[in-house]
Image (cartoon, rainbow, N blue to C red):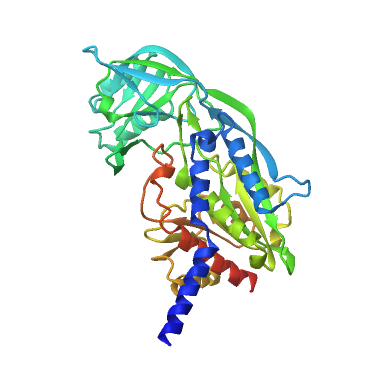
Amino acid sequence: MQRLLTTFLGLNLAVNLYAQDLPYARKVVDTLASASMHGRGYVSNGDKIAANYIAQEFKTLGLKPLANNNSYFQYFSFPINTFPGKVEITFRWKDGRAQKCGPGEDFLVRSASPSVKGKFPVVVLDASIVGSYERWKNFRAQNLKKTFVLVDTSGVSDKQQLQLMTNYVRYPTNVKGILFLVKTSVMSHSELDDCSRMSPWDFSQVQSSVPVIEVSDIYRDISTIDISIGAKFIRNYTSQNVLAQITGSQFPDSFIVFTAHYDHLGQMGKTVYFPGANDNASGVAMLLNLAKHYAKAENRPKCSIAFMAFGGEEVALLGSHWYNDHPLFPLKKIRFLINMDILGTGDEGITVVNATLFDREFKDMQKLNAQGSYLPQIKPRGKAAISDHFFFTENKVPCFYIYTMGGIKAYHDTCDRSTTLPLTKFSEIFLLLRDFVSTLDNG
């Protein structure tokens, strides 16, 4: 009996290991997070290179386009501010010292900033100024149109004074530019791999009139800035969703849907890019791993499965919003949708958004997790407008959004690299999703 049990467990483990392809997942993450993808943004056609890669993977795996026009792409357009030119800063001190700094580690150009070039003096706005009405009044009266203002909030605890400084950064006038001091942290993965983390970056669909630069607080004593920033505002940039399907063997008009956004933050200048390994090359790797699994004849589902790689997620969920407004089959035919974003760790399990909306399905997932001993925990969360599931939720489509917890904390910064993304529970999450699909497919 013991020998039979051992044999059964060994066969079950072998089947589970065969069901997913971790080396393939690693290859996908490495490729999407590489410099050749330019951060999968809107400089150097990064989003298009990534979309073409995913479409080719769909084709190689034997998936059909979801659209009737034999194309994997669904196009949509939007305005976007980009930084394709130089992004260079040299800080200078009164004693003659100078430091050429790197974007992403020493400073970040806020995403709405315009182009700026030249050498400018720097004046400081700090606690000593906002702490006195007269000094604040005199500061505001200055002509600073050829000056950068360095805003230093350290030592300011009064809420009204902090609000004055916040509003000054948010609505700058009569000034050449703003330098806003931020405290950086070092993410150390090994003796040879340290990464200095700035604030999370984002996109802007407008371009402001005054540049705002977030600067590491180690540069609080500078007196001059040499700066060259080349921004380009694109009024009508065209990106794309990448959409494919596997037709169900019994219920081709009923769909289980997997979604993951492939876009990320792109480049800041000509050399610095945001890899986006966890966010969300990891989710696309899961999407393609699932596609590879269900494309095999022996795994063909009863229901159809749609695989949707969305663009524009980092720009206000634009790709999924567009799809919801222009669906390629009626949304009411979706039996269940699973959105996957940030799946590269999992030391502490996963969180399931919409768990409180779909309690029965959430309990099914928890039960499957317990049976398979996959993850430390599956944490429930309510409705949240934070990823591509949201507009489906608004359109009454039953859906979950899952993301991993624990492990590396890199997010919207240059530290989110493939080389340091562990994929800790990637295989276990795959098996959990496979089991969950089985319950949906046979329900």
Camera sees residue 146:
yes
Q: Nearer the viewer, residue 73 or 26?
A: 26
399 over 133 or under it: above or below: below
Query: Considering depth in this image, is 311 or 37 the residue closer to the camera?
Result: 37
| Image x and y of residue 335, in percent | 65, 65
Q: Tell me the quarter of the picture where residue 121 sits.
A: top left
Q: Is residue 11 above or below residue 268?
A: below
Task: Name the residue rendered at 41%, 54% in the picture.
Answer: 345
Tell me residue 228's x, y (percent): 43, 17
Residue 389 visible? The answer is no
Residue 39 percent location from the top left of the image: 50, 36
In the picture, the quarter occupied by the N terminus is bottom left
- Number of labels in the image equals 0
Q: Is residue 129 left or right of residue 166?
A: left
Q: Who is closer to the viewer here, 190 or 376? A: 190
Q: Residue at x 49, y 38 (%)?
A: 34
Q: Image quarter for residue 395?
A: bottom right
Is 306 situated above or below 419? Answer: below
Which residue is the extreme one toward the left? 95
Q: Is residue 185 left or right of residue 145?
A: left
Q: Residue at x 53, y 34 (%)?
A: 36
User: Where in the figure is residue 430, as x and y percent of width and height?
Assistant: 51, 61
**Res. 236 image quadrant:** top right
In depth, the one of 331 and 62 nearer the eye is 62
| Quadrant of the frame with the C terminus | bottom right
User: Among all residues in the image, which is located at the extreme bottom?
Assistant: 1
Residue at the far right in the pictured view: 69
Q: Residue at x 30, y 35 (%)?
A: 184
